[in-house]
Amino acid sequence: MNNLKNIKKISNRIFKKPQILENLKISEKKPNYEWSSDTALYYLEIENFPLFKKINHLPLNTQYALGLAITEWIFWRFEELEDITDEIERVESAWAGLININYIKSLEYEMKEDDDKEPIKGAIEVAKYFLNDLYLYYKDPEDQKYLASVVVSQLLLARRLMFNKKEFLSWFEEVMERVATISDPKEQILWRNELFMQSCDEVETKTDNEFLNALIKTDNKYINQNVLANISNQEPNKYQKQLEEHALWVKTQDWYDSKKEPYAIFKNPPLLEEINQLKEKFGDLPASYLKTLTEFGLSEFTYDCYTAKMLSPKEIISSYDIIQDEMDFNDGLREDILEEDGVDFYKFIPVMAGKGVDGAWALLDLSEENNGQILYWDTDEAGDIESTFENLEEFILELFERSRTDDPLPLTNNVEPSTYHNSEKETAKTLNQKSIIEATQNQDYQKALEYTQLALEYDSTNVETLYNQAYYLSQLNKLDLAEKGYQQVLEIAPNFQSALFNLSHILLGKNKFEEAKLYNERLLQINPTHYKALVIKGNILFQQKKYKEAIEDAYKILTEIEPEDIAGWQGMGLCYSWLGDNKNAIVCNKKAIEIQPRNYMILANLGSNLNNVGQYEEALLHLNQSIDINDKYYYSYYCKACVFSLTNHLKEAINMIKKVLELEPSQFEHLKNEPDFENIRNSDAFKQIFRKTNK
């Protein structure tokens, strides 16, 4: 199949491959798994109660989104091996269903009798079948209780299909950790860019409305175009070009002072469902207001000693009656003042709120004849309408200009927070998200660390931010500070699995085996099959020279959980080597090499084991392969020296000994006393090397 043709087809769709999947190169390898009709049937019937329980406690929206993200892992896995245009169209429509399930026309799919036997088509067939189940179960309230079981099936299927299983499972664990640290269930609903931890630089990750408008322009046969088209039938925006220019301008400005305190905070627009709630209460909304809401989201600005923020639909509805009451008060915007001009004040809704010295509101006029006019009402001046604006665009653009030019104060420091939200926590969340982007997109952990430290100034007990700070410190090799950081996280959230794992990993690296074991055992009590924790457990036991325990209590379990991963086989190979059981060590190391053929360390270990049982020719074969891959790894030459000595090749053995000392002089005593060198120990060449080196 023409690979370039496939890529061209995919590029015509809205979605691009998430950067995290691009970096992992998940599409480059052909299938390395067995597949048959029985395999397909197995995944259609598989159950895993611990995973089901873990996923089932999530909000339904998040279960659905998680299932879609896992489905994308599967489809993108085969991008360079199969035409996945149809599959990506299905996923795009399914994501639209997260905004409104009625946007999906149908995802119905029937598995073909022959295709389920093929390793690529069969896997894709099963994944599409599960995708349809996700849609059907999410759509029907009576079937939503089965949604988690479909996510589990899709997860287990994806794990089988990935050649880089460890990275896939790490992604899943990180997503689950992120959701677990969010206390508000409503905030646990994650959109595509959040699940794939990428920046909002693609159409589908900017706003719901932009994503839906982009879908209208496609020929996606799985989208209900009649329903979707309703969002584009708004009145043309006469200021649209100006609005878009200003939107571009504000998005390219630095809205922080020298101390990195923000003058403006940018947040996502409300969901279409929330806007529909406004329409249900107040009727049709001016197109100018909807367009401004899409471009600028629920943002907040500061200028001089004033603040202003866009209100969410929920805040508008909750504050509407309050505003109406205040407009009747003598010290407010009185009814008679508006009635003098023939204005029905019940047609005004609050869309922006002010706080601080200036207690002001932006009131949106819903009257058809005024088409979204804005009254700027100052509650501190009785009945004083500060000014009127033709629409919200004009008003919000002036606020932006003033925010940049009128000597603004930091938004969340010197100015009293808005009545309607905790701006400090919002600022902290924004800064933390910036840190994630710096770390995941740019690998700039220093800058990411600076963002988390700023975020903690506003919300010092946020577990996710504290965890990110500790992680960035570890990436910068500031391990003492990282250790303290993870301990601080665990004081607040004792069951934070990633913190327990990372802390035990740091302690292991410091040879603090008992402390590492303590935290790792806590993690395994929470999650007995935690793969990374079992790796750490095996490594701790290995370092403590408890080789039999390491095999039985850790490494063997790893091979049962994930037989196609290298960690368990490599660990057992090392333990058997130290126990002198070269026969079993050879079996384990050969299995590890099947999984990672270019792992030069395991090739050297295998060569050593083969040398110990007298299989010299095969030992040299693997040792030479190790050197071809990495000619700076001294142990490969060390083992070759042993083989040459035992086979009475004096000259070759001496050359290998010299190479070891060139690469790793610290091996002098080991070489001098190596039992395998008895055949050459009394030779002049051997004596000369060690006499000369001694001097």
Image (cartoon, helix red, strand yellow):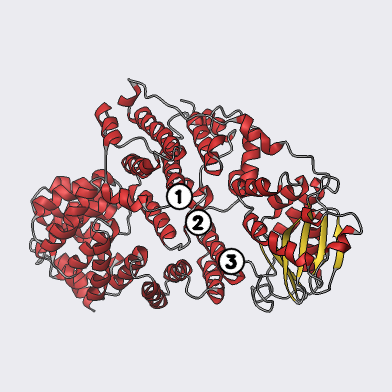
- Which residue is at a point 20% across and 55% down the rendered structure image? 605
Q: Earlier in the sequence, mark 2 or mark 3?
A: 2
**Residues at marks 2 and 3, CA–CA distance in whole angstroms:** 15 Å
Q: Is residue 29 shown above or below 487?
A: above
SS state under label 2: helix
Residues marked 2 and 3 touching at CB (< 8 Å): no
Label 1–label 3 contact, CB within 8 A: no
Does residue 156 sit above or below 199 in this rendering? Answer: above
The kind of residue on which mark 2 rests is Lys
Measured from the top left, where is residue 623 in percent x and y?
23, 51
Check the picture and name the quadrant holding the C terminus: bottom left
Which numbered disc flags the more N-terminal residue, 1 or 2? 1
**For residue 288, side relative to residue 682 (left or right):** right
Residue carrying label 2: 186
Three-letter code for the amino acid on which mark 1 is drawn: Thr
Q: Which residue is drawn at 69% across and 60% down?
A: 321
Which of the two discs, 1 and 3, labels the residue nearer the N terminus? 1
Residue at mark 1 to residue at mark 2: CA–CA distance: 10 Å
Instruction: Judge by depth and name the residue closer to the eye, 657 or 165.
Output: 165
Q: How crowded is mark 2: few (under 14 residues within 10 Å), some or many (20 or more)?
A: few
Q: How crowded is mark 1: few (under 14 residues within 10 Å), some or many (20 or more)?
A: many
Q: To which quarter of the image does residue 676 belong?
A: bottom left
Residue at the spot of label 3: 426
Q: Which mark is residue 62?
A: 1
Residue drawn at (33%, 26%) of the image: 116
Say which quarter of the image contains residue 237.
Answer: top right
Q: In this view, does 310 lie to the left or right of 577?
A: right
Specify the quadrant of the image occupied by residue 260.
Answer: bottom right
Badge 3: how crowded within 10 Å, few (<14), some, or many (20+)? some
Q: What residue type is labelled 3?
A: Glu
Cα distance, mark 1 to mark 3? Answer: 21 Å
